[in-house]
Image (tube, coloured by chain):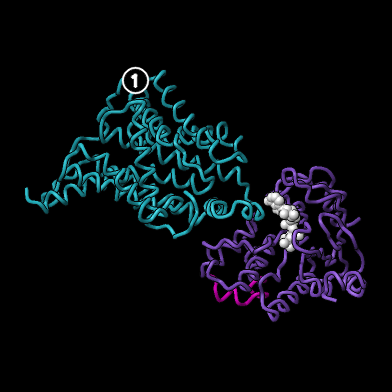
Amino acid sequence: MDFAHQLVQQLINGVSLGSIYALIALGYTMIYGIIKLINFAHGDVYMVGAYIGFAAVTIGNMPIFPALLISMALTAVLGMLVERIAYKPLRHAPRISLLITAIGVSFFLEYTSMYFVTPTPRTFPEVIPNISFDIGGFIVNGQQLMIFGITIILMALLTYIVQKTKLGKAMRAASFDTETAQLMGVDSDKVISMTFCIGSALAAAAGVLVGVYYNTIDPLMGIMPGVKAFVAAVLGGIGILPGAVVGGIVLGVVEALVSGFISSTFRDAAAFAILILVLLIKPSGLFGKNTNEKV
Amino acid sequence: MAMLEVKDINVYYGAIHAIKGISLSVEEGEIVTLIGANGAGKSTTLRTISGLLKPKTGAINFLGKNIAGMPAHKIVREGISQVPEGRRIFAEMTVLENLELGAFTRNDKDEIKKDLEMVFGRFPRLKERITQLAGTLSGGEQQMLAMGRALMSRPKLLLLDEPSMGLAPLLIREIFSIIVDINKTGTTVLLVEQNANMALSIANRAYVLETGRITLSGDAKELAASEDVRKAYLGG
Ligand SMILES: Nc1ncnc2c1ncn2[C@@H]1O[C@H](COP(=O)(O)OP(=O)(O)OP(=O)(O)O)[C@@H](O)[C@H]1O
Ligand SMILES: [Mg+2]
């Protein structure tokens, strides 16, 4: 296999992994945009999404697409509950209280899940035929196509909601200036709740897709992708939606290249190297404006 | 009964007692102005009426309903719209999106369209810049956008917080003549200003605010002529 060939192959792998980071990063960045919270529990919400999808497929005997939808719907409710119970009472508290609460929620979700599903990893059944396509010598498998397809659909849907609908306009307005949005008649509590709803649904989709892609899920599976999606969000410019997508894809590609050409041992280090570089060179991220705002 | 009746409100920022028992009223159809020096409490008063702040004590009656403590997003629906100090336009959204947000409380698409045309009629410069990002407008255009945005909710009472701030004299005159015009077409106006001369020249009545208290009130023309006001606020 020559170099160019392997490069393209790693790009294909990188983009599929990156799509998953992007889906998680979108939730991070939306939530940050509106309440300035790095929601450390977001990776665990993604984990719960994976388990709900798993339960729907195994216990519920559902095909993958209904399972995906059910997981997104239930996880959206979970996200809204987390916001309502844990974060809303702290609306006027200092940001550090909110941050510490998010860490608490993260542990809560991890270890409550562990209690119910045991720490043993589960094997995700084969939900789509294990086929791969040979496109001009490059291998794309069915799971990857499914990841691309679903990610694109979800992003198109999100773009539509954010750009065209009344809810989307309210979300953008409240992210920019909550108080003035309220003067327009926007109920900021409702908008915040909807942001958690959408962000969590996207994370759930990512969780189910990862289950399908890597075949295995466990209660702590959210930690690493959670951190990496955070890196992706920072890379793209936290609070900026297209930034989260680009950040996620770039991170996925970099990881694939590192594991393909150097060693998969250094894969995780790549994410942190990127984080450090961004913070040193352009803390506002690829798409961010250079402001002095503290992140 | 007055359209708006503020009765003995006290407003605090933590331990800071910013508004110390203010009462004021606005009759339907009037332009009432609230003038006073920096830090007197003008914005605090407006922000309490619009629901961004809650008075600790006191009542705010609007069209017979006590709205004190009601959240801001509900007060707009009652018919009060505020143009905040410093305009606070949504800089990263287009001019059109800003105006659409002004109509956020409404669902009557056709009527919203009509009001959009009304706003463009009043502020032709906005029409030319409909797809421009609001943050790229000039200061005067941003003020026009903030006012147009507030009008899009079809308010019965319009609260204006220092619309002249940072504008050139010619533009101030233009903005003030638009305020008079808006009032003539049936919108009651409560105007906060540091530019007391201009404010008193268009208002029916005025209140003078000093460190959280109303120290003078009355007919705008009479206040403009009064010795005390001339000395303190009109530069002699
Ligand atoms: N967020 C805040 N926290 C604490 N104190 C505040 C806050 N906002 C205003 N104040 C204080 O309340 C008082 C009244 O302020 P306010 O903004 O209402 O004055 P103003 O009359 O609008 O002044 P200006 O003409 O400068 O806009 C001032 O002493 C101010 O320092
Ligand atoms: Mg003020």
Chain in cyan, by letter, is A
**How far from the left and from the top, in percent, is residue A21?**
34, 43
**How far from the left and from the top, in percent, is residue A42?**
43, 37
State the residue at coordinates (62%, 66%).
Answer: B113
Chain in purple, by letter, is B
Q: Quadrant of ligand 2?
A: bottom right
Q: Quadrant of residue A118?
A: top left
User: Is residue A63 visible from the viewing direction of this image?
Assistant: yes
State the residue at coordinates (44%, 60%).
Answer: A290
Q: Which residue is mark 1?
A: A119
In front of the other: A119 or A79: A119
The single residue placed furthest to the bottom in the displayed view is B170
- Classify B223 as above or below A272: below
In front of the other: A99 or A46: A99
**Disc 1 residue type (three-letter):** Pro
- The magenta region covers B118-131
User: Is residue B43 visible from the viewing direction of this image?
Assistant: no
Secondary structure under the numbered disc 1 in the rendered image: loop
Q: Is residue B128 magenta?
A: yes
